[in-house]
Image (cartoon, rainbow, N blue to C red):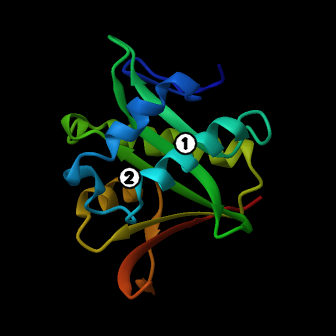
C-alpha cells in the first residue's frame, strides 16, 4: 500500500479494494455532497474502481483515502488530477466526513497535497474549484496558498476558482 503522507493525526494512502463501501458511504451524507458535482452511485463505484486500477500507473496523481492514525477511522478522500486533462494544470480536490469538519484536517491535508504536487508532478499550476457557498473549502484552499481568481461558470453554475502558479 502506497502512503502519500503521514502526520501525527492522519495518513493519506491508497484505498484498498475492500474499502469500496467505506468510500461510497462518504457520499451518502447530504451535508458532504451539498457542494459536490451530482453523481450516481454507479458513477461513484466507477470512480473508486478506476482509482484502484490507477495506483502504480501514475503514482503522482490519484484519489486517496485519509484515515485517522489513532483508530484507523475513515476521515475522507483527497485527489490530485489533471484539470480537464490539461497537462501541467493539477486540480486539488477533497471531501471529508462531516464529523471531521472544523478540526483543521482539511487545511493540513491541502497544504500537504500542494507540497506533494509541487514535488511529485510536472505542475505548472495548481487549481481548486468550489461552489460559491462553500466558504469553508475556500478558506482551506487559501490556507494552502491558492489565490482566488475570477469566478467562472460550469454547467450553468457560477463557481469560485483558485490558482497557484508554479515557477519551475
Q: Where is residue 107 drawn, in percent x and y?
A: 36, 44
In whole angstroms, how far apart are the C-alphas of marks 1 and 2?
Answer: 28 Å
Tell which residue pokes out farthest to the front in this image. Answer: 42
Question: Does residue 20 lie above or below 58 as drawn?
Answer: above
Would you identify the image quadrant in which residue 38 lies? bottom left
Please tell me which residue lies in front, 24 or 42: 42
Q: Is 26 situated left or right of 3 in this image?
A: left
Please tell me which residue lies in front, 54 or 12: 54
Please tell me which residue lies in front, 145 or 94: 94
Q: Is residue 125 visible?
A: yes
Would you identify the image quadrant in which residue 58 lies? top right
Q: Is residue 93 visible?
A: no
Q: Is the C-beta separation of discs 1 and 2 under 8 Å?
A: no
Q: Where is residue 54 drawn, in percent x and y?
A: 71, 41
| Pair 1/2: label in front | 1
Residue at image position (54%, 36%) is 64
Q: Which mark is residue 167?
A: none
Give the mark, 1 or 2, whose residue is nearer the N terminus. Answer: 1
Question: Does residue 91 lie above or below 66 as drawn?
Answer: below
Question: Does residue 145 lie above or below 75 as drawn?
Answer: below
Q: Which quadrant, please, contains the C terminus?
A: bottom right
Residue at image position (40%, 65%) is 37
Tell which residue pokes out farthest to the top in this image. Answer: 70
Q: Where is residue 127 drawn, in percent x and y?
A: 54, 64
Query: Which residue bears the numbered disc 1?
Result: 48
Q: Secondary structure at mark 1?
A: helix
Query: Which residue bears the numbered disc 2?
Result: 143
Amino acid at each position: 500500500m502506497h502512503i502519500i503522507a503521514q502526520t501525527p493525526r492522519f495518513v493519506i494512502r491508497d484505498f484498498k479494494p475492500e474499502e469500496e463501501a467505506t468510500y461510497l458511504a462518504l457520499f451518502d451524507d447530504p451535508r458532504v455532497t451539498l457542494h459536490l458535482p451530482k453523481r450516481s452511485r454507479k458513477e461513484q463505484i466507477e470512480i473508486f474502481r478506476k482509482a484502484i486500477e490507477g495506483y502504480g500507473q501514475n503514482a503522482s496523481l490519484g484519489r486517496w483515502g485519509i484515515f485517522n492514525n489513532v483508530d484507523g477511522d475513515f476521515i475522507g478522500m483527497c485527489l490530485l488530477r489533471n484539470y480537464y486533462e490539461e497537462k501541467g494544470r493539477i486540480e486539488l480536490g477533497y471531501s471529508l466526513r462531516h464529523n471531521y469538519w472544523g478540526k483543521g484536517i482539511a487545511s493540513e491535508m491541502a497544504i500537504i497535497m500542494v507540497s506533494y504536487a509541487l514535488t511529485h508532478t510536472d505542475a505548472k499550476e495548481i487549481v481548486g474549484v468550489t461552489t460559491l457557498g462553500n466558504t469553508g473549502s475556500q478558506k482551506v484552499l487559501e490556507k494552502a496558498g491558492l489565490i482566488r481568481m475570477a469566478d467562472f461558470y460550469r454547467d450553468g453554475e457560477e463557481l469560485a476558482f483558485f490558482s497557484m502558479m508554479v515557477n519551475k
